[in-house]
Amino acid sequence: MQQPEGTNTPAQVGVEAGTQDDARAIRALWAEMARGWAAGDAALFAASFAEDCDFTTVRGDKPFGRAGVAAGHDALFQGPYAGTVLDARVVAVRFLRPDLATVEAESTVTAPDGQPLATTHALAVVERTAQRHWLISAFHNMIPAPRPVQQAPDSKDSTVDEPTAARPRLRHLAIVARDPEKLAEFYSSVFAMELFHRDPDGSCFLSDGYLSLALIKHQLDGETPVGFNHFGFHIEDTAATTEALVAAGTPKPAERFTNRPFAEYRAMDPEGNWFDLSEHGFGGPRPPSDSTGS
């Protein structure tokens, strides 16, 4: 269908609606946030946000408005993020109207010793006010998960445990740990899990490409007990895994004498958290063959 004269397609609106000055002003909002973060000045950090902005943290918390953003970050600057630096990068700006745009941004928080603590991605909506100032009206932050590791198909794994589009798979488990860093090293060395995030309080987050494992720092003044029930690993070689576990100083896995068709062995990590080991997977037995052929 031919466009009437004087109209733009949506793509053209995104290109033409905002000026270069507008784009620079929008990027300056993130630069101002970084300056406020480096100075430990929550009010300066929050100045980039509208008074009634919607803000969602990586944990799903929703402090309301500029005042809520300032209060939440003041607690961070006075506590676990004291002395840290924020590297905020605007990846893309898309103008929906001359006074409205979406922004994709990435940020990295670095500890005083230069160690990266966290990398986050955010999608934001920015608006130009009547005074022609740009402010963030909505901001949703997130921690990106590692991409799944691509593995070659294995015929022995083609059971009902195989992921399907119709059935969701568990992808996250959590353990409350006294020493998350030590446990993170354990799971990285024995099971090749990837550490992709650290919280300033010492909590560590790992992934095998499909499932994320949170090792949450135990708080002495909290009510949450240390540990978790159990979880399971689908392994390829029981003997090799047993050797690695024993070398890491943990007891030899014990065979499970049950009529269950999976989770053949049970083992424990250095803090006594139980987990299952299985070469067959955790999806249950294959359907029995039908000798009638019907």
Image (cartoon, grey):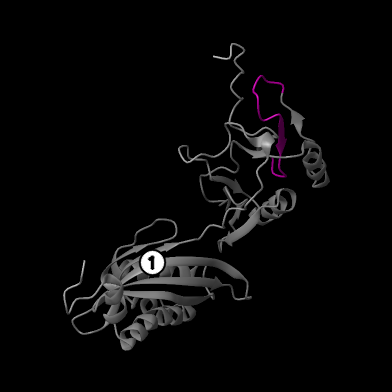
The quadrant where residue 46 appears: bottom left
- Describe residue 158's horizontal placement relative to residue 242 as left or right: left
Instruction: State whether residue 126 is above or below residue 144.
Output: below
**Residue at 53% in and 67% down:** 119
Where in the figure is residue 101, as x and y percent of width and height?
Answer: 30, 73
**Residue at 71% in and 48% down:** 191
Identify which residue, 59 or 234, lies in the foreground: 234
Is 269 within the magenta? yes
Where in the figure is residue 123, as x and y percent of width and height?
Answer: 38, 66
**Residue at 62% in and 53% down:** 149
- Describe residue 211's horizontal placement relative to residue 68 as left or right: right
Alpha-carbon neighbours of circle 1 within 10 Å: few (<14), some, or many (≥20)?
some
* Magenta-drawn segment: 257-272
Instruction: State whether residue 40 is above or below residue 71.
Output: below
Is 218 within the magenta? no
Q: Which secondary structure class fits the magenta region best?
A: loop
